[in-house]
Amino acid sequence: MENEQILLNSVQMARFVAHGSLRLDAVVPDELNAEALTFLAPGVADIPYGTPLSDAYAPDSFAARLLEVPQVAGALRSLVGPEPLVDHHAVHVLGPHGGRAQELHADAIIDVRPDAFDVQLMYYPQAVTLDMGGTLSVPGSHLRRINESDTGRYQNLRGQTRLVCPAGTVVIVHHGIWHGARRNDSDITRYMFKIRFNPTVRQRLLWDTSDLDDPQVVRELDTMFPWYEQATGRLERYNRALLWRALTGDAEFDLDYWVTRVSNRPQEVAA
Amino acid sequence: MTTEVSTSVLRQQVLVLYLLNSALDSYVVGWSQYDGTGRTSPTTGDSTEPPYDTGLDALKDGWRLIQASQLIPPYPGHEYDVSFLKHEFFFERIVQL
């Protein structure tokens, strides 16, 4: 169906806020995946930074059709809203038995916007096996204030994700997520097409909010990850509560009273 | 009298453990390794389980602690920021080639 968008629901958005990523397995049709390898192999011409999405790709181009996949279109609409800007795009190619693992990093430079975020779409046209060097990412790392590859010293963290996925999988990540291409130890060249999007509207309640009061929303937001330090893990949830406030406009939202408790500064004079 | 000259060559192996809190016997949440012998080449994302459960377990296996991260108070105004892993411990082991 043309131009259909399958929006995220509140539980999925909460999961994105906690994990810093959204995974859409095998959502891209086989015929598009087959075409992708031809399209991606020679590389994709650069476009100017900040090109409006509607100007970035010709309507019948491969990239335009990829972004029209209903789950992809709906996820982007839910996360960054209509008509985002294409920050940049790139084809990542990992040759067989070649190269080395990338250091763990966040893209661009340190980016601490409390009420806005970019997303990066990562599209995998082939099935990715463990030895093909699928992207390493660290769930729940996106709110950490670090600058690019300063995290390169960290080789492995408990609960890290080493992407293994079926063909046609799209992963959308928050701009701050720690990630890196792993070493390709297979006989197969691995391709990934990445597009970074900048929002042009306030990122508030852009998704299907009909389940906003579902208790699973809070459970998703409250997720702890195995690599979190005991004390800092509490601060992670504090910061997530603030991000959820920004995304929903609910200035009272909290997780386990973390924000409310330390914001309590009564000014009333005792009678 | 003869003098015995050692022909052995020594190299350093480094293990970095990131722990759950500032106690050396707390749980490992992250790990990195560097091998000065060149016999192995540990790298990013190469394993899912740490070599030891705690920092103390590394000591028990012969690793020598050479550096522990300091406890630094948060910068004023940034008490709720999250950033690098705080509890970083460097170990070494000297091995003969």
Image: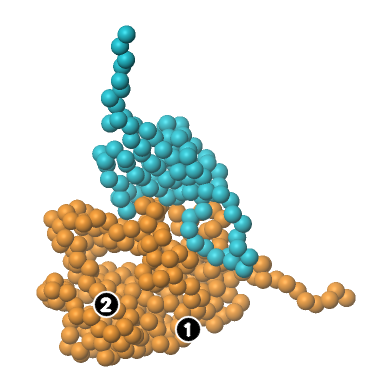
Which residue is disc 1 drawn over? A204
- What is the residue that sits farthest to the top in this orientation? B1
On the same chain, marks 2 and 1? The answer is yes
- Residue A142, located in which quarter of the rendered image? bottom left
Cα separation, mark 2 vs mark 1, equals 25 Å
Q: Residue at x 20, y 62 (%)?
A: A94
Quarter holding the N terminus of chain A? bottom left
Q: Amino acid at mark 1?
A: Arg
Chain A rendered in what hue? Answer: orange
A63 sits to left or right of B79: left
Query: Which SS class for mark 1?
Result: loop
Q: Residue at x 57, y 80 (%)?
A: A250
Marks 2 and 1 in Cβ contact (< 8 Å) = no
Q: Residue at x 56, y 55 (%)?
A: A231
Q: How many marks?
A: 2
Residue B70 locus on image (x, y percent): 56, 49
- What is the residue that sits farthest to the right in this orientation? A271
Relative vertical location of residue A20 with respect to residue B69 in this rendering, above or below: below
Residue B60 locus on image (x, y percent): 45, 31
Q: Residues within 10 Å of mark 1 (few under 14, many from 20)?
A: some
Q: Amino acid at mark 2?
A: His
Mark linked to residue A89? 2
Q: Which chain is cyan?
A: B
Relative vertical location of residue A70 with respect to residue A152 in this rendering, above or below: below
Residue A251 visible from this viewpoint: yes
